[in-house]
Image (tube, coloured by chain):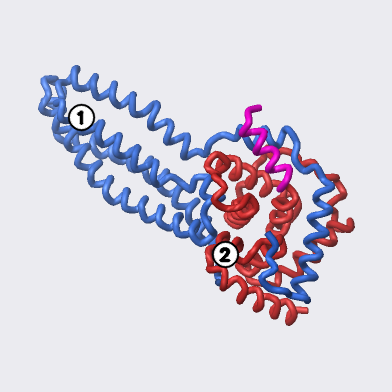
Chain colours: A red, B blue
Amino acid sequence: MDNTEKAFERLVAEQKGTIYSVCLMFAADSAEADDMFQEVLINLWKGFPSFRGESSVRTWVHRAALNTCISYNRKARRRKAAELEIEAQFLAPESPVGRQVEMLRARISCLEPFDRAIVLLWLENLSYEEIGQIVGIPARHVGVKLVRIREKLKNSK
Amino acid sequence: MENNNHTYSDELDQLRQQMEQLNAALETQKIINADLMDRVMRRDVSWFNKLLRYEIFLMLPLAIVLFLAIKFMFGTSWLFFAGTIAMFVLDVIWDSFIMPLPSTDFSTLSLLDLRRKVIRQMQQRKTQLFIELPVLVLWVIWFFYELVGTRVEVFRHMPPIVWLVTIMVSFGLGLLAVAFIYRELDRRSRRIIDQINTFVEGE
């Protein structure tokens, strides 16, 4: 294994939870989330040699995760996807984490998809500037959108 | 970096707490393993990249050898040989620019820029088709004109109807191949654009 591969593995090990939670929020089920996760890793790996640190690692990872999950081809799910190392019952609907995911999904699903992406990035502690860079809108609009999103969430209760 | 540009002591903060709990729970899972990383790093290139490699490393050398052979066997002109190879090279170069989104774009472009790029590529493909199709028709006519003017008796005395049918069949087959590739690329681009459009409707 060369240095690039080692560096990439380190990066994935550090960001795996973040990437997977983004996939979980966009996927219809955990099998689809697993497939999306692999697709994100492939896009990250292919983009890794050209990553020069112009944006932070987190912005870069979130951008790849979001773009991949949105453009994900649901009809072409890979047949030979590798198994992920997640405990069998970890995401089951009756498990605490499974319930947590469903609760989060239910709360976020009342939003427009674009707002869903913004709120998801905000929940991941990204700054307005980073969110703006990822979705392609000015940072000041992010703040305005989040105020509206909060209102929508309040009204949807 | 903390995004404390604003404080939302309500719904959003509750969601953030839940997300933090989810992320903390996910940290207890290994998720990645050697098999997964191996598949990610050794994944085959896309079918279009394969097609591009096939054009560069197989079709282009084959075309050079084939048209050189035609030149020496049938006496077609050097101009025709040079023109054919130049067309082929230009087409390969053009193809490399209009290929489907490279994976690097997913990590470097914003969502809206990604959509802009896919739309631009679709327009470029359409332009390529409108320019290359008439050029292809002219090339096929040129090719048969060259063959008619060769020293090979069989070509010189072939009835016009045979020429016409040969031209139509070879052109038709070429057109079918182009249409298939074009349709497949277009279908993929449209899917991405539709999904991003659905996504940004609220924007």
Give the label, 1 or 2, closer to the camera: 2
Picture residue at 34% right of the left edge, 43% below the top: B94
Quarter of the rendering containing residue A11? top right
Check disc 1 and give the amino acid type. Answer: Ala
When the figure is inspected, residue A152 is found, relative to residue A139, above or below; the finding is below
Picture residue at 32% right of the left edge, 39% below the top: B91
- Mark 2 is surrounded, within 10 Å at the Cα level, by few (under 14), some (14 to 19) or many (20 or more) other residues, namely many
Picture residue at 89% right of the left edge, 56% below the top: A95
**Alpha carbon of mark 1 to alpha carbon of mark 2: how far?**
51 Å
Q: Main secondary structure of the magenta part?
A: helix
Q: In terms of secondary structure, where does tag 1 sit?
A: helix
- Mark 1 is surrounded, within 10 Å at the Cα level, by few (under 14), some (14 to 19) or many (20 or more) other residues, namely some
Quarter in which the N terminus of chain B is drawn: bottom right
Is B77 placed left or right of B6 in the picture? left
- Residue behind mark 1: B82
Q: Can residue B152 be seen in this view?
A: yes
Residue at mark 2: chain: A
Instruction: Judge whether residue A9 is colored magenta.
Output: yes
Residue A63 in percent (x, y) is at 60, 55
Check disc 2 and give the amino acid type. Answer: Gly
- Residue behind mark 2: A132
Q: Can residue B173 be seen in this view?
A: no
In magenta, the rendered stretch is: A1-15
